[in-house]
C-alpha cells in the first residue's frame, strides 16, 4: 500500500508525494507518520472482495498461479457476503440482525452459497450467475488437491469469477444503494474507531 500524508496533501496537494508503503492489513486502516512530524491515517474504502481480487491479479502478474486461484475464490466468497449484507441493510435490518444471521453461516461456504442464491432469487427473481461445474472442479483441484495450474487456466478462472461478480455487483449498487453506502462507511468508521481509541 503506497501511503500519502493527509496533512501535507491538505497544505499543498501538488507537492504531496507517496512517503511510505505498508503491507496490506485486514482492517484497511494505515497509520502515516511523515518526515514533517504529521500523524494521519489512511482508510481504504475498498470492500474486502475488491482487495482480494486485486491480490489475485497481482499474484498472476508475479507468476503465482495457484495463489491467484485462491485469492479469486476468496474474493467471490466475500462478494456473496457483501451482497447479502447490503440487501439486508437495504431492507431495514440492523447490523446486529445481520451478525446474528451471519454467525450461522460464517464457517460454512456451502451455507453461504445457499443464502446467496436464496437472497438473490428474492431480490432479482432469477438464480444468480455462478461458477460452472468445470470451474468448480478446477478450483477444488487447485485448492484441495495441490494442482499447479497453468497461467492461462488461472486467468480463465479469474475471468469466470469476474463474470459471476459483475452483474450481481451492478444490481447491488442499483438496488441496495443505501445498504452499500452503509456497509462502506460503517466498516471504515468502526475500524478507525478501534484503531484510534484502543479498548481494554
Ligand atoms: Zn506530512
Image (cartoon, rainbow, N blue to C red):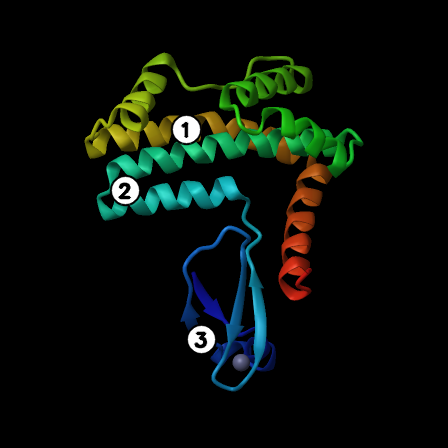
Give the mark, 2 or 1, whose residue is nearer the N terminus.
2
The label shown at residue 161 is 1
Q: As drawn, which residue projects farthest toward the right?
A: 92
User: What secondary structure is marked by label 1?
Assistant: helix
Give the mark, 3 or 2, whose residue is nearer the N terminus.
3
Left or right, 123 with respect to 12, comes to right
Quadrant of the rendering where the C terminus is positioned = bottom right
Q: Give the quadrant of residue 126.
A: top right
User: Residue 66, how many percent across, how many down?
Assistant: 27, 35
Q: Please tell me which residue is depicted at 47% across the width and 54% down the height of the picture.
A: 25
Q: CA distance from mark 2 to mark 1?
A: 14 Å
Q: Residues within 10 Å of mark 2 (few under 14, many from 20)?
A: many
Does residue 177 sit above or below 145 in this rendering? below
Q: Give the quadrant of residue 18.
A: bottom left
Q: Residues within 10 Å of mark 1 (few under 14, many from 20)?
A: many
Q: Residues within 10 Å of mark 3 (few under 14, many from 20)?
A: few
Q: Which residue is mark 3?
A: 17
Amino acid at each position: 500500500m503506497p501511503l500519502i500524508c493527509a496533512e501535507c496533501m491538505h497544505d499543498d496537494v501538488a507537492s504531496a508525494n507517496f512517503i511510505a508503503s505498508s503491507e496490506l492489513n485486514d482492517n484497511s486502516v494505515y497509520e502515516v507518520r511523515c518526515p514533517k512530524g504529521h500523524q494521519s491515517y489512511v482508510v481504504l474504502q475498498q470492500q474486502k472482495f475488491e482487495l482480494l481480487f486485486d491480490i489475485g491479479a497481482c499474484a498472476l502478474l508475479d507468476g503465482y498461479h495457484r495463489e491467484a486461484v485462491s485469492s479469486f475464490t476468496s474474493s467471490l466468497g466475500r462478494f456473496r457476503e457483501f451482497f447479502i449484507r447490503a440487501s439486508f441493510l437495504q431492507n431495514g435490518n440492523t447490523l446486529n440482525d445481520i451478525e446474528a444471521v451471519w454467525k450461522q453461516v460464517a464457517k460454512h461456504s456451502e451455507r453461504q452459497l445457499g443464502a446467496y442464491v436464496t437472497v438473490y432469487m428474492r431480490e432479482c427473481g432469477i438464480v444468480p450467475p455462478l461458477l460452472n461445474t468445470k470451474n468448480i472442479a478446477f478450483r477444488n483441484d487447485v485448492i484441495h488437491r495441490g494442482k499447479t495450474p497453468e497461467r492461462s487456466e488461472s486467468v480463465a478462472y479469474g475471468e469466470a469469477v469476474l463474470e459471476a461478480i459483475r452483474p450481481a455487483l451492478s444490481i447491488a449498487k442499483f438496488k441496495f444503494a443505501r445498504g452499500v453506502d452503509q456497509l462502506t462507511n460503517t466498516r471504515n468508521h468502526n475500524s478507525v474507531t478501534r484503531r484510534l481509541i484502543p479498548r481494554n
